[in-house]
Image (cartoon, rainbow, N blue to C red):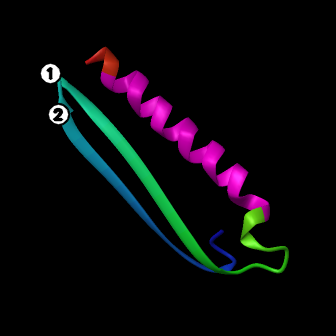
Amino acid sequence: MQELGTAGALAITFIEKDLKTEVTMTYAAGGYMKQGLDSIGGIVDDVLSLQLNRFRSYADKK
């Protein structure tokens, strides 16, 4: 998305819940892409999910 006319905001929140940490990731993007941003929404979701799951695997080992 770096070469597109877009802007995005990523928010990650950590909340203690029942002696564990609940992590929530929210990403919002807007702007212009010839094919429409909806065409890459699933790919962006997949990449962010992969990253968050890798973080979870790392954190669970600590």
Name the quadrant of the C terminus. top left
Q: Is residue 57 shown left or right of residue 3?
A: left
Residue picked out by circle 1 = 19
Which residue, as the protein is rendered here, is positioned at the far right? 35
Magenta extent: 39-59
Does the magenta segment cover residue 41?
yes
Q: Is the magenta stretch mostly helix, strand or loop?
A: helix
Q: Which amino acid does label 2 sit on?
A: Glu
When asked about the image quadrant of residue 46, the answer is top right
Picture coordinates of residue 31, whole percent (x, y): 63, 82
Residue occupying image coordinates x 57% and y 36%: 50
On screen, 7 above or below 25? below
Query: Which of the two residues, 10 or 54, is positioned nearer the viewer here?
Result: 10
Q: Mark 2: few, some, or many residues within 10 Å (few <14, many ≥20)?
A: few
Residue occupying image coordinates x 24% and y 43%: 14
Residue picked out by circle 2 = 16
Q: Residue 2 carries which label?
A: none
On screen, 21 above or below 26? above
Residue occupying image coordinates x 28% and y 49%: 13
Between the C-alphas of marks 1 and 2, the distance is: 6 Å
Does the magenta segment cover residue 35?
no
Q: SS of the residue at dot 2?
A: strand
Picture coordinates of residue 36, whole percent (x, y): 78, 74
Q: Is residue 2 shown left or right of residue 11?
A: right
Q: Mark 1: few, some, or many residues within 10 Å (few <14, many ≥20)?
A: few
Query: Which of the two residues, 34 or 3, is positioned nearer the viewer here?
Result: 34
Q: Which amino acid does label 1 sit on?
A: Leu
Q: How many labels does the image show?
A: 2
**Callouts 1 and 2 close, C-beta under 8 Å:** yes
Residue occupying image coordinates x 37% and y 25%: 58
